[in-house]
Image: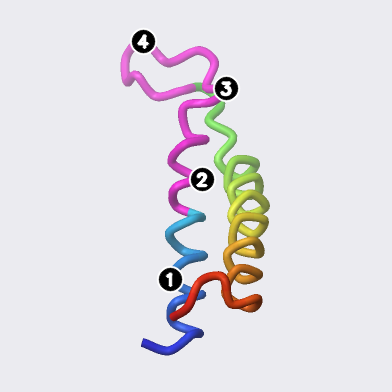
Amino acid sequence: MTRAAVLVGAFAILWFLAFFMLLPVGIGGADPETGAPHSPKLLLKAGIATAVAFVLWAIFYALIAFGVVEL
């Protein structure tokens, strides 16, 4: 595997982990008929997940760049 594939895959995994961890946060009330939340705020959660994933990815990249982790 190339370094680029590992880095892209790592970012995707980190983003989905962060996003799925943020989904239940701040849901608020739910519609009694459907059970769906009134205001899920998905765009905000996606933005926060992107920021969290970027920070974690940058740490992962630094570990690779400084030779702590070898591919």
Q: Nearer the viewer, residue 12 or 41?
A: 12
Q: Nearer the viewer, mark 4 or mark 2?
A: 2
Nearest to N terminus: mark 4 or mark 2:
2
Residue 51 belongs to magenta span: no
- Mark pair 1, 3: CA separation: 28 Å
Q: Nearer the viewer, mark 3 or mark 2?
A: 2
Q: Residues within 10 Å of mark 2 (few under 14, many from 20)?
A: some
- Mark pair 3, 4: CA separation: 17 Å
Q: Label 4 is placed on what type of residue?
A: Pro
The residue tagged 3 is: 26
The answer to whether residue 66 is above or below residue 29 is below
x and y percent of residue 51 in the render?
Answer: 67, 52
The residue tagged 2 is: 18
The residue that appears at 50% across and 12% down in the rendered structure is: 29
Count of numbered circles on the image: 4
The residue tagged 1 is: 9
Q: Label 1 is placed on what type of residue?
A: Gly
Q: Nearer the viewer, residue 36 or 44?
A: 44
Give the SS element for disc 1: helix
**Badge 1 vs badge 3, beta-carbon distance below 8 Å:** no
Q: Residues within 10 Å of mark 1 (few under 14, many from 20)?
A: few
The residue that appears at 66% across and 70% down in the rendered structure is: 62
- Mark pair 3, 2: CA separation: 15 Å
The residue that appears at 44% across and 77% down in the rendered structure is: 6
Q: Which residues are magenta?
A: 16-37
Q: Nearer the viewer, mark 3 or mark 4?
A: 3
Q: Quadrant of the N terminus?
A: bottom left
Residue farthest to the bottom, as pictured: 2
Nearest to N terminus: mark 2 or mark 1:
1
Q: Residues within 10 Å of mark 3 (few under 14, many from 20)?
A: few
Q: Quadrant of the C terminus?
A: bottom left
**Badge 3 vs badge 4, beta-carbon distance below 8 Å:** no
